[in-house]
Amino acid sequence: MKNRSLAQPIEELAFGAHKMALVSGPRQCGKTTLARMLLRGRTRGTYHNWDEVEFRRAWAKSPSTVLPKPSGRDTPLVVLDEIHKDRRWKRNLKGVFDTLTSPCDILVTGSARLNVYMKGSDSLLGRHYSFRLHPFSIRELERTDVLGPDAMLQALFGRTERMTRAARGNLAAILTYGPFPEPLLAQNIRTARLWRRNREQLIVREDLRDLSRLPELGRIEMLTALLLERVGTPASLASLAEDLETSIPTVKRWLGYLKELYYLFEVKPYVRQVPRSLRKEGKVYLWDYSGVKDESARYENLVACHLLKACHYWSDTGEGEFELFYIRDKDQHEIDFLIVRDGVPWLPVEAKLGETTPAANWARFARVLPCARALQVVNRPVWDEHAFGDKRLLVADAAEALRYFA
């Protein structure tokens, strides 16, 4: 059982402030493992899953009965997994929390974005902190501490953390098996294929059905197959609608559901300060990119997941508001990614499989972006700095450079 980096901020920020922790993330990304790790640190605690019949009955009859009996010993931890499937979960959870007679920490986990289920009159505002759990990154395979954004940038350009022997192997493994714990740790290609097929069926046939009640599940499975070929490219709703023989609003709605269920995420174009910027289409990436056949697209998806994980971690732990964009103008000049901090461009990142010379578009966008530093990650053993006026571009081995992120 591997420790997870999100455990420490949950204990410190949520439980330390006597608030509930709501943790969402992709199906099978390690939420149960995280819960068990937190439970191991307590003398008392319980784990409940909505799929358990006895728990559902007890929750429906009297939600407070799932809490441990009051005791003078250490604060207990109660884990409630997938309770958002109860249509009255917010009201019941609010009632449980507001009527606690003794200290009790509550962890709620879900394989869909819990903010979707937060809408309505029963608000949990002021009673919880939300966290997003990602699958493994190169750094988390080796260690669970995460650098803050300023410390990360300083350490990266100072190259303070030398690459370990395991880093190159970890990058190759994540590219081959994907970032999810079961196939990644097993490192068996047949197991990985079976796991991926089962996961996709669960998301479409169960999670999507529960969320949307859609009857067109077969065509949504066709959509997921089409998305494998469109990773890293601006998603054309018109093209997808034509291939699926449906309307553009329908495709847009289906993509929205797949986002909420952590099947895919979209990186939007950054339009401020960029002349003739592209303003409409976002690029689509998958949470599990192991099935992407094109090596370049799969590698770009891996980089996107590492950067998004850092943005979510820093945002969820109070370091600021971090968002991930890309830059593209109408003349087809592009930078793959741009991390924006509190609304201001902070770090542009380019993903290249083997191009160790600075990408041609760096000089063009360096003039309009306020970022003092930029990064080009390459799947090659390289570490070189280049200057564009007073700005610095680091061309670095992805296996080493991505270790500085979350």
Image: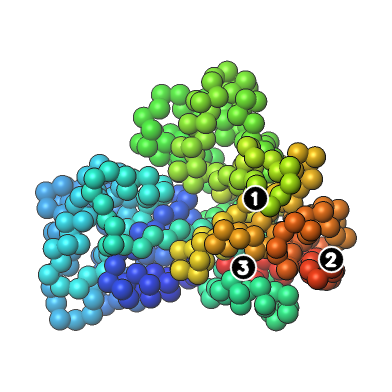
- At x 36% / y 30%, what residue is drawn? 213
Measured along the vertical axis of the image, is residue 88 above or below residue 187?
above
Measured along the vertical axis of the image, is residue 148 above or below residue 346?
below
Image coords of residue 382 (percent x, y):
83, 68
In front: label 3 or label 1 = 1
Q: Amino acid at mark 2?
A: Phe
The circle on residue 405 is 3
Q: Quadrant of the C terminus?
A: bottom right
For the residues labelled 2 and 1, the Cα–Cα distance comes to 21 Å
Q: Earlier in the sequence, mark 2 or mark 1?
A: 1
The circle on residue 272 is 1
In the image, 277 versus 184, the foreground residue is 277
The circle on residue 312 is none
Which class describes the residues within 10 Å of circle 2: few (<14), some (14-19), or many (20+)? few
For the residues labelled 3 and 1, the Cα–Cα distance comes to 25 Å
Are the residues flagged by discs 3 and 2 in contact, CB closer than 8 Å? Answer: no
Helix, strand or loop at mark 2: strand
Q: Amino acid at mark 1?
A: Arg
Image coords of residue 204 (percent x, y):
46, 35
66 sits left or right of 376 in the view: left
Helix, strand or loop at mark 3: loop
